[in-house]
Image (cartoon, rainbow, N blue to C red):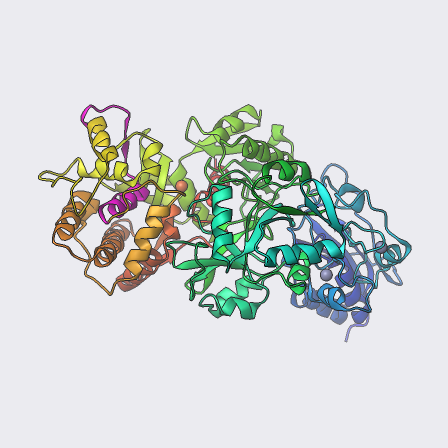
Amino acid sequence: MNQETIARRLQIRGTVQGVGFRPFVHGIARQKGIRGWVSNGPIGVVIHAEGQEASLSSFVERLWAACPSAAEVTDIQSIPVEPQGFNDFRIENNLGVAGELTLRISPDLCVCRKCLNELNNPQDRRYRYPYVNCTQCGPRYSIIQRLPYDRPHTTMASWSLCAECQREYSDPDDRRYHAQPTACKKCGPTFRLVENDQVIAAGNDAIQNAAELLRAGRILGIKGIGGYHLACDASNTDCVAALRARKYRKEKPFAVMVKSLNAAYDLVDLTAAHAHQLTSTARPVVLADASVELVGVAPGSSKLGLMLPYAPLHHLLFECGAPSPLVMTSGNQSNEPIAFRDRDARARLDGIADALLVGERPIARRVDDSVVTVDNGDPLMLRRARGYAPSVVAEITTSRPILAMGSDLKNAIALVVDGQVIVGQHIGDLGYLENDRALEETVNDLLGMYEVDLADTVVAHDLHPEFVSTNFARRLGAYRTVGFQHHHAHIASVLAEHQLLNEPVLGVALDGTGYGTDGSIWGFEIFHGSVADGFERCLSLRSFRLPGGDAAVRFPVQSAAGFLHQLDDLPDMTKPPFHFPGRYLDAIRLIDRDFRCFTATSAGRLYDAVAALLGFTREVSFEGQAAVWLENKARQSDHQPAYDFDSFDFRLLMRQIVADRLAARDVEAIAFAFHAAISQEISRQVKRLSERYGVSKVAFSGGVIQNELLRQMLRNAIGQQGGLQLLMNKRVPPNDGGICLGQAAMASIV
Ligand code: ZN
Ligand code: ZN
Ligand code: FE
C-alpha cells in the first residue's frame, strides 16, 4: 500500500454554508487522520486535504455519505495539489477571494432534535428558551442583512454573547461553533405579550399567557420566523368564524399547526410521503385529504393544510397547553402580504388579533410558509418560501449571470450564478405596493448575496407588456433584457428541472391566463420543440371571446358566457337548473357588441365555465376556487365515460353538459366526465403529435396542473399510450411561482 502523503483540493458545492458543514468536515478529517484546512469559498466550501491515498478517499466518501441533515452536497470536485506539510486540520475563516465572493445563504431551518432536548430539559441553561438554535438549525435567510453570513450582519447583531455562549461559539468541537444566531436566556432576545399596546407579560410568562388566551378562544398575532401568524383554536367554530370575519377572508382555507405527527394522523390521511414532507427540515404546510371536518377551516374543500411546529416558540406554546390543531394563517388582512415588522403588525393586525406575541429578534425579510402536496408519491411544490428559499433548484450552463423576474401572479424570481439556478421566496401578487417593494428587495438581496453586477446580467421577463415585473425588468439597466412567452416558460421550468434543455418534447400548458405571442390570452396549449430551439404552438383549445377582462377571473358565469356564446339553441340560462345571475346576460351583451372582450384559449376559464354550469354561479372568494370546487365534485363520483372533446372543440363538451344538466344527471358524474374528457383528449392528441414529431417525452405545467384528479387521470391516460414519458414539476410550482425557472432556462440559450 502506498504510504506516501498526497494532497487534494476539494471544491464542494450545494447547500454547505451556514449549516454546520465546516465543523462536520473537521470532525471527519480528525477521524480519518487528514491534515489541512476547510474554509467557505467563493462557490461553496473548499478543503485542502493531506494524507495517505486510502484515508483521503474514505474521507471524501464520508463527505458524501454523512452529510449533516440541513446540508446538501451536490458536487465535489477534486484536484491534486502539492502537499504543504500540515500537521493538523483547521477551520479557516472565509477565504477572501476578492471580487468573486458568491457565498450561499441557507434557507431557514426548523429547530433540531438536540436543541429541542435542551428546550425540554430543566437542567439545561436553555430550558424553555424560545430562541434556541445551533449550526444545524434555526433562522438563516430571514435574519441575514448582508454577507458574509456573520453575526454582525444579522438581526442578532444587537445582542452580544455572554461568556458561556461565546465559549461555545469559539469552540470547534461545540455544536454551536460559529452558530451565528446563537443566544441564551442570559444574553439573547425573548418574547413579550402585548395587549392594547401594553406589555402584559414577558419571557416564558408571555408564552404561558398566550397559550391560555388561545385556549380561551382568543385570536393572537404570533411572530414566527418569516412573519406574523394569526392563530386561534381550530376546533372552536366561533373563534374560526370570528377570525374569518375580522380578516375579511370568506372561504379561503386556513392552514393549521398540530403539535405532533400523531395529531396529524387524527386529521388527515397521511401517506408515508406526506409524513416525510411534514417532518422535513423545511416544515412546509402539507396538503392532504382531510379525514375529519374542522368547521370553517377549509370550507368546501376535501383537503386540509397541516404543518408541524418549527420554531422553538411553537413547541413551547403547545407545551404550555395551546390548543392543537391551531389555525396558523398569515398575519394580514385578506390578500395583503403577511406582516413581519412589529410596528406594521401592530397597525395591520389591530382589530384582528386580541393580543400580539411579539418576539424581540427582528425579521430581516418576509418569508411565508411554504405549501407542498404529494403527487404520485413525490413532493409537489405549490408555494416555495420558508425552508426552501433561497436555494438551488436546477443547474444550467450559461456564460453570464441571469436574473429571471417571473410572472405578476405568485411572483418569485430566479438568479443564475455559476450555472446554478437559485430561486427566491414566494413574493406573491405584484400590484400590492408592498409586494412590489418585496420584489425589489429580493432582487437586491440576491444580486448582493451573490455579488452579481446587473451590467453583466441577462434579465428575463414575461412577454406581458403591462406586467409590473416586465416594467421592473426594463428599468434595471441590465446587460440585456429579454421577454419570454408565459407558457413556453411554464414548460421550460419542467424541462430545466429534468435537465432536458436540448431534447425536443411536447409541452402541454394548462393554465389560467398568460400573454400569447399573438397578443391573445393563452392557457390550453400543446407545444412542440425544445428550450434550445424554441417552441411551436401546435394545438390549442378552440378560442372564445372572454368578456370583461380581469373581472372574468372572479365570476365563473362571465367565463361561461364566453363559451356558451358559441352555442345555438341554448335554454334560458337564468332559469333552473342553471340559475345564472344577471351578470351572465351582461357578459353576453358585451360579447354581442364585442366590447371589452379578449380572444382566449384558457384552461382555467374552461374549468370556471363548467363549474358555473354545475352550480358555482357566485363570485369566487379566492383564486382558483371554482376549479377546486369542480375537482371536489368529480372526486365524489364513480368512474364515468368521458365526454366527446374532439380536437379541443369545447362546443361539443358544453352541449353535452348543458343537455345532461337539463336531464338532471348528477353534477358529480358530469364533473367526472368533464375531467375524463380533458385528460383523454389530451392524451389522444399527445399520442398523435408524438408520432408525428418522433418525440417520447411530454411535459405538463400551468396552474391547472395543481388539480390532483386531473394529474392522476393524465398519468393513467398517457401511461396507457405506451412509450411516452410524462414529466411534471417537483421542486418549483407548476403555477406561476415556477415561471422564473423556465425564463432562466430559456435565457441561458439566447
Ligand atoms: Zn439545533
Ligand atoms: Zn448567552
Ligand atoms: Fe401561468
- Residue located 18% across and 54% down the image: 643
- Up the image or down, 148 lies above or below 235; here it is above
**x and y percent of residue 217 in the render?**
56, 55
The residue at the far left in this view is: 569
Q: Nearer the viewer, residue 157 or 405?
A: 157
Q: Is residue 713 above or below residue 141?
A: below
Expressed as whole percent of the image width and height from the top left, the position of residue 448 reads 68, 36
Q: Residue at x 57, y 27 (%)?
A: 478
Is residue 628 found left or right of 427 in the rendered image?
left
User: Magenta region: which residues?
Assistant: 592-614
Does 59 appear in magenta? Answer: no
Q: Position of residue 524 (x, y in %)?
A: 30, 43
Left or right relative to 570: residue 315: right
Residue 602 within the segment the image draws in magenta: yes
Q: Is 680 above or below relative to 458?
A: below
Q: How many marks?
A: 0
- In the shown orientation, is residue 318 left or right of residue 82? left
* Residue 698 appears in the rendering: yes
Residue 255 is situated, as x and y percent measured from the top left of the image, at 51, 54
Give the image quarter of residue 596: top left
